[in-house]
Amino acid sequence: MIESKHVTKTFELEKSKIPVLKDVNFSANEDEFVCLVGPSGCGKSTLLRIIAGLEHADSGEVLFHGQPQTSPTPKITMIFQLFGLLPWKTALENVEVALEILDIKKEARVEIARSHLRMVGLEGFENAYPHDLSGGMKQRVGIARALALQPEVLLMDEPFSSLDELTAKTLRSLVLDIRGKSSLATNTFIMVSHNVEEAVFMADRVIVMSPRPGQIVGDVKVNIPRPRLRYLRDPVHFKYVDEVVEILEKSK
Amino acid sequence: MNCHLIPGASPLRYPARILRDILKSPLERRLQKKPRREQGKLAHVVRVGRQALAFTAGLLAIVAAYWLVMNFVENPEISSLPYYTFRTLLRITITLGISVAWGVPFGILASTNKTASVILVPSIDLLQSIPILGYFPVIVLFFISLFHGGEFGIELSAILLLFTSMAWAIFFGVVGAVKGIPVNIIEAAQSFGVTGFKYVRHVILPAIVPALISGSTLAWCDGWFFMIAAEYVVYLGTTYSVPGLGSYLAKAAYVYNDLNLSVVILVLIAAIVFYLNSLTWHRLMERAATGTYKPVARIGLSGLGKLGVIRPRWLHLGDRIHRPKSLILASKWVKRYTRLEKAVALAISLTAAFLIIYYIAGQIPSEVGFHEAFADPEFLNLPVYTVLTLGRLTVAYVISLGIALGMGVLAAEHKKFAAVFYPIYDIGQAVPILALFPIFFVYLSRIFGGRFGLEITAIVVLVLDMIWYMFLNVVGAVKSIPSEIKEVGRLLGFKGLKRITHIVIPAILPAIVTGSILSWGTGWNTIIFAEYMPYEMELFGGQPLSLPGLGSYLDKTGYLPPPKGNTVRLLFLLGEIAVIVLAMEGLVWRKLLRRFEKYRVEV
């Protein structure tokens, strides 16, 4: 579904060059939940933005259904670390305005937006501004907005790292629950995280990146049955966590 | 453009080079620092050499310009030009020193002591909203009577007049900086037992250094802007002047009627301001940006524009670092006064105004009764005048808003436009707008005729004055739209006009309101000078040319001999302006700010 082929990226700023990504190869298949983990500054967010079409690789390419993916498309949407909500729009408008890109009539847009807000448990908060919502609720709006577009691929850029641990836990489960629904059009999930436990809890595969310039140094398949909540304190969970941490330590 | 309405918070007067630095993304800045550190000794020598070369070249250019002017311009006083320059420089420097000496202790007092804050902050806020003209009667009368018209008395009154336009920026800069000290630093100081003088020495003083430098920059520019008004005072028909560039420029226009000479002096002033700014303030600002706790540097929010929109770029790291909570709290706290503070300030200022009127009315034997003050037949036109002046300000405001929006968004988003607009801004702020006025008028009146020419001149001067506040606020706000919001816009496919209406405009609305407050503030100050043209007395049928309006009426009341000139009426008119300014602030801007507060992206 998504393939990253020899992706290399260097930031160039007034004479100094900072290599961020170096020959990154990986793929995320249909029905897969992939998590990219790595130390901060390793370029994992940049990689996610290249997949989204927000940035361009200097060399190499990202393929989506075998075609080069170079510009934003509603088929690939994103959830942001700081939610990325427009503060001047209500929760409902934030979701609704996203649907404008799909050429749907206003009434239908509002209906879709409502149902998605309901799906993330925000019924009754349609007319609240982001300003008045808690961090967890804001991210719920972010999730509703991303899913309302019925994308095939959902990108998540450290979606829970600006929330407190309890809220983050709830939202992780929410995302996994939504993913389990058969009606969902989205089948590929790519998440960036620096939280190894979170990655092991959520992903089918954990891809480990080295410090800058980011390279892929490990690809761990997580064989824990779902729903995973009951395995959170299980030795098998920690086995995978240890494995990922070990790769991270080695790549330092 | 007078900048005494903005405290250290707004970097309106920051030179473009530093502006660019402030607005640069944090990543860029972080990355930039490294190579600088890695530079070898040779590179350092080259840099210092280049600076020395630029310094010498600039100095030589100015000396050459003086030599040319003094040899080729004919005027009986031309040989005194260097002396006048020296006097003006000295005057502004001394006033800056006095302003700092006054602003630091009072600023610290007002920001650390609650009682002092309740009294000082609102009263000084009120004082700073009075145009320099409003201080004429009190200051000039006092010093001239004290020294019986001697030159020393006039000099002192000139310095004090300058002080009334320079001191506020420093005071509010200090207040903002002290109030902006992060709570964790205050708590750390307390837990280590750093109190009293030690606290001032180790916590407060380092915190106010950047604000002091930016405040001094603002004050310095204010000084140049207002020196013409301060050095050449026409009060109730009598001229009081002290030797200086400002009074020479005024004399060139009013006494010698020599337009070429005034253009030449104007260009010289602009060159000196530009040269000295790049020599001193630019460098100091750069240093200030790297020292002490940065968070404090530009959080100071006070004065009429209590919402400094241009916040340090590094506070908007987008998705990397969080803005410390304490900063948000501090800035929110500084942002508004309580009702009590306002009431106390109002009571104090009313009492003060009453005492001043009472004192002055007692000083002038010819103006015994109050009824004489309002016996002037023109007084009945006051409502019409008010509407006309408000109309002029509105027209100029709308024009400058439109231009500044376009320029600001382009400059913020495209390097090519920035390369053109920043230097324009840099030069635009070095030119004292007041001095441009006669020059514009002569050219425009040739095209449009006297009355209409003056009307257009007034608008043009107002636009030139108001536009930079808007421009800077727009640039700063567009630059600080968090990257996530921009990315969302791109992901949602907003392009062209849709991007502007859905993302850019809503994101900068708070900044537009702040820019509007500042623009209107400076506009009020400028229109007082822009509606009245005493200088064309001979060119246009021996009549002073004026536009019907509040500003020109104020001028006549202030400048002309009695019965037209009248101190009581002058104070009344100033009071009217103060009421209008405060009413607009309370009824329009504050409401808008509160509404748009929600639009601020919380990072």
Image: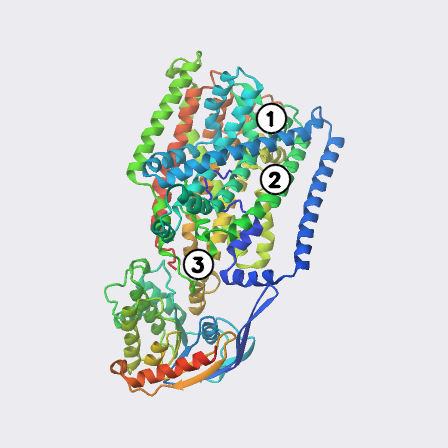
Q: Amino acid at mark 2?
A: Val
Q: Which residue is mark 3?
A: B316
Residue B536 numbered mark, or none: 1
Q: Quadrant of residue A90?
A: bottom left
Q: Earlier in the sequence, mark 3 or mark 1?
A: 3
Q: Residue at x 65, y 26 (%)?
A: B257
Badge 1: residue crowd in 10 Å (few <14, some 14–19, many ≥20): many
Tag nearer the camera, 3 or 1: 3
From this viewpoint, is residue B323 visible?
yes
Q: Write the residue at 28% across / 37% down.
A: B340
Q: Taking B276 as reference, is B114 left or right?
A: left
Q: Chain of mark 2?
A: B
- Residue where numbered disc 2 is placed: B273
- Above or below for A188 versus B279: below
Cα distance between the residues tagged 1 and 2: 28 Å
Q: Earlier in the sequence, mark 2 or mark 3?
A: 2
